[in-house]
Image: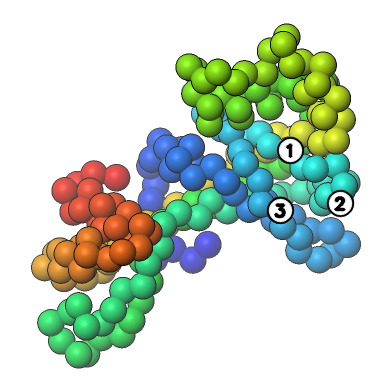
Amino acid sequence: MYIPKPFQMEDESVMFDFIEQHNFGILITTQAQHPVGSHLPFWLDREQRRMYSHFARPNEQWRDIEDQEALIIFPGPHTYISPTWYETNQSVPTWNYVSVHVYGKITIIDDPSEVLGSLGKLVLQHEGPDSAYTLDSSNQAFVEGLSAGIVAFQCEIAKLEGKWKLSQNHSRARQENVVRQLEQSKHEDARSIAAQMKRNLEGGP
């Protein structure tokens, strides 16, 4: 990913937080020398530096994916930035956004217990510990039957790239004005970028 220095995020813990908050990623690999991609939910094991997900078995992307260097893109909020928000007309439109790229090798998970464990952790991540729904003995046979229709995998994280493009290449006054404009937007992404810009101006991630 092209990342000019002002926009580079190097704090791994911040990028991991971001992945957990925006965990529906795009997995990109090659198949017969052509790029292919799938939109998939992931859960992250920070300590082991691994990511887990699964394909629907009819999705052909999994068949020759092992040992490839895969790219997983986690897009975050993004919004248009108007040049009318600056104090001069010597400016151009741009786009502010946050995104993380993960690079690593894929390994297919064959052990049924590991597959169920991976599914359980993904469910827990979204349902929460107090949810009425869990994967346990009450529905294990049903889930095991359905799990035959998926292909689970893990990705060993080799490299992380983070881009926080939040107008850092402009003056503080301009950034503050952009924040004010975005806070008035009816679009959730614009307001999310405004909140991220405010944290950045206050010295936070």
Write down the quadrant of residue 92 in the picture: bottom left
User: Amino acid type of disc 3?
Assistant: Ser
For numbered disc 3, what is the local secondary structure? strand
Query: According to the image, label 1 marks what residue?
Result: 54
Q: How many marks?
A: 3
Position of residue 85 in the picture relative to residue 139 (left or right): left
Q: Crowding near pointer 1: few (<14 within 10 Å), some, many (20+)?
A: many
Above or below 147: residue 179: below
Residue 205 location, x and y as percent?
A: 29, 45
Q: Earlier in the sequence, mark 1 or mark 2?
A: 1
User: Amino acid type of disc 1?
Assistant: His
For numbered disc 2, what is the local secondary structure? helix
Q: Earlier in the sequence, mark 3 or mark 2?
A: 3
Position of residue 31 in the picture relative to residue 129 (left or right): right
Going 49% across and 18% down the picture, which residue do you hit? 129
Query: According to the image, label 3 marks what residue?
Result: 38
Q: Are marks 3 and 2 in contact (CB under 8 Å)?
A: no
Residue 81 location, x and y as percent?
A: 31, 74
